[in-house]
Image (tube, helix red, strand yellow):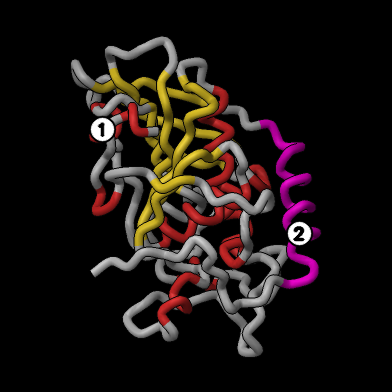
Amino acid sequence: MSQPVPVDYQSRVQKPDDFDAFWDAVLHQVAAIPLNPEIIPDPLRTSEEVEVFQVFYTSLEHVRIAAWYCRPSRRAEQIPAMLLLPGYQADPPIPKEWARKGYGVLSVAPRGKLRSNRQFNPGYPNLLTSNIVDRHTYAYRGFYVDTWRGIDFLLSRPEVEQTRLGVAGSSQGGGLTITTAAMRSEVRAASAGAPYLCGFTDRRGDARGGHPRPVLQDGRARPEDPGVSARRDQRLPAPVPGARRGGAPHAGQL
């Protein structure tokens, strides 16, 4: 049974002193890398209701990231947009359901996922631990950025209304939803289901039945774990109504 998260919830995991400096340096590095988005129509998967595209863009360390982009075939001049983020074992789906509801939707495959594994492929289940001893080469450093750059892709689309951006995912995708909402102020709504790689499980007093948290033995998170941080402007984005259990709310709700 789901339980509400208190509005004043705070994780017990301590934010490292160099957290902001670490991620500011990463964001500065990736800002110098052109996105170089490529969008390829997919007529085989396109229908009368939904247009489907294969998408590629460049992320940290010049890794090319793959994604699926769907939009309504019949749409207003500007539409709200959603970023969908995958679970640890899942490969990103083609998000036609959301497009039928009126959204432009990007379903991202961060590095190591199918179609994004030519330049970086640690193999399953090694993504979680690949280069974990070095914060500057740890796999999730780039993995987080790959998802945030999905927001840049949506902002580059002329049909997307830039003030109506949301993000959703469950398990690993739930944790990535939290980090994306925390690090990208453009996000206006978020739905994180059973979030993994963050400190939300400690609100129940234990982690029974939950996912592991990226915490060191002394209780301090690594600086490369943005899931432990509050949003920089101290505001959390609103939840996406109806987005739980994989459902897609109508575009008018964002």
Position of 99 relative to 65 (above/below): above
Q: Amino acid at mark 1?
A: Lys
Name, please, the residue furthest toward the bottom.
217
Q: Relative to 180, is 72 on the left or the right?
A: left
Residue 79 placement: quadrant: top left
Please, what is the three-letter code of the amino acid marked with disc 2?
A: Asp
- What range is drawn magenta here? 16-34
In the rendered image, the vertical position of residue 75 relative to residue 30, given as above or below:
above
* Residue indicated by mark 1: 96
> Residue 177 location, x and y as percent?
47, 52
Q: Main secondary structure of the magenta part?
A: helix
Q: CA distance from mark 2 to mark 1?
A: 37 Å
Q: Is residue 247 visible?
A: yes
Taking the image as shown, residue 82 lies to the left or right of residue 16, namely left
At mark 1, the secondary structure is helix
Q: Residue at coordinates 62% horizontally, 41% vertically from top-left?
A: 185
Relative image position of residue 112 (x, y in whole percent): 48, 55
